[in-house]
Amino acid sequence: MAEEILQEARPPERQSLSAQQAAEPQGTTHGISHRPWTLPPQGLALFHGDQDTARLSHYFLPRLLLEGKRVLMLDGANCADPRLLERLARQRRVPFERFCRQIEIARAFTCFQLTELIARLPRLLADFPAEVLIVTAFPELYYDEDVRDWNAQVAFEQALANLRRWARSGDPASAGRLSLPACAEEVLQDARPSERRSLSASQAAEPQVIVHQIEHNLGGSTDLKASAAAEPGLALTVAVFSSATTFTPSPARRRFFEKVCAAGSEVWQFNSNAEGKLRLVCSQYIVPRNSLSP
């Protein structure tokens, strides 16, 4: 499946933002310097589509890992599949253990846990210095009907602000740490009975799994600790994989996805062409400021 998808990946389709954009040649739209099915060298890129979008994040990993990059995944969709990673490694004749040394995964089961993980990036990257951050189920994890609109909005805004700051600066110190635990405590105090049943204090304020090892279930777990030290001021690529357009959120949360799009330097959509082949279409590209000449 991976090879079929990658073979069918085509140059960026003409964008629909303006007549000028539509007239630009395929593959050079707005000066995009990388091909589809790859991630930009820095900034925040949003990839969205149907309910399988989070799983498609796996097909971006082989190129990154073969380039020697380290990847941290904050998995709100609970989609990380060690067997699929093992297959991708085998197809490229790369030992699976090599892939495992370059990727760490932190799972979030609630929107509060995902917000807390994003706030903890400096701490996580101190232990595992990664160049790429992948986030799944953002913002649809914040559509949970058992969480009140106001509480979901507070958690979402905090997470988005940290993601934007992190993608823009590439400096872990600048991302800071927002006071989510206090917010989560307030959420629980004001929670409806259904929220109290579904969320404990530890769930709201602390991710159940902070960073864990990939267990590929084919022979035990592997050590994922990286020996390389983080480079100061390293530019970080943030890639968000979202199926938000397949949800119908409450009116108070309908702009969550729009805000994520606005925060992204690139927005890509997975869809099918006339032959039913999967492709990526770029609908937004913003030239990073630090790439512009004085």
Image (tube, rainbow, N blue to C red):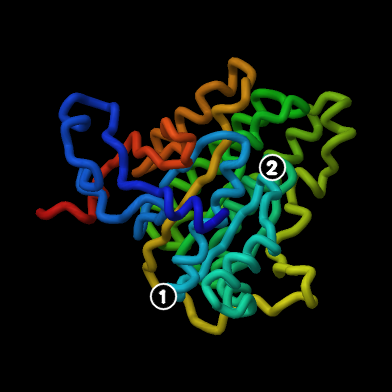
Residue 236 shows in this picture: yes
Rounded to the nearest angstrom, the CA distance separating label 1 from label 2 is 29 Å
Between 173 and 30, the one nearer to me in the picture: 30
Q: Quadrant of the C terminus?
A: bottom left
Indicate whether 94 appears above or below 51: below
Question: Dot 1: what SS?
Answer: loop
Residue 44 shows in this picture: no
Indicate the amino acid at tag 1: Glu
Q: Looking at the image, tell me whether mark 1 or mark 2 is earlier in sequence order.
A: 2
- Work out which residue is located at the far left of the displayed protein and give it: 294
Q: Are marks 1 and 2 in contact (CB under 8 Å)?
A: no
Circle 1 crowding by C-alpha within 10 Å: few under 14, some 14–19, many from 20: few
Between 210 and 216, the one nearer to me in the picture: 216
Residue under the image location 85 percent in, 35 percent down: 198
Question: Dot 2: what SS?
Answer: helix
- Report which quarter residue 96 is drawn in: bottom right
Between 101 and 38, the one nearer to me in the picture: 38
Residue under the image location 38 percent in, 68 percent down: 234
Q: Position of residue 111 (x, y in %)?
A: 68, 40
Between 291 and 39, the one nearer to me in the picture: 39
Q: Position of residue 84 (x, y in %)?
A: 65, 60
Q: Which residue is mark 1?
A: 231
Q: Is residue 65 left or right of residue 283?
A: right
Q: Which residue is mark 2?
A: 112
Indicate the amino acid at tag 2: Phe
Indicate whether 273 appears above or below 78: above
Circle 2 crowding by C-alpha within 10 Å: few under 14, some 14–19, many from 20: many
- Work out which residue is located at the far bottom of the displayed protein and give it: 227
- Work out which residue is located at the far front of the displayed protein and give it: 275
Q: Position of residue 289 (x, y in %)?
A: 23, 49
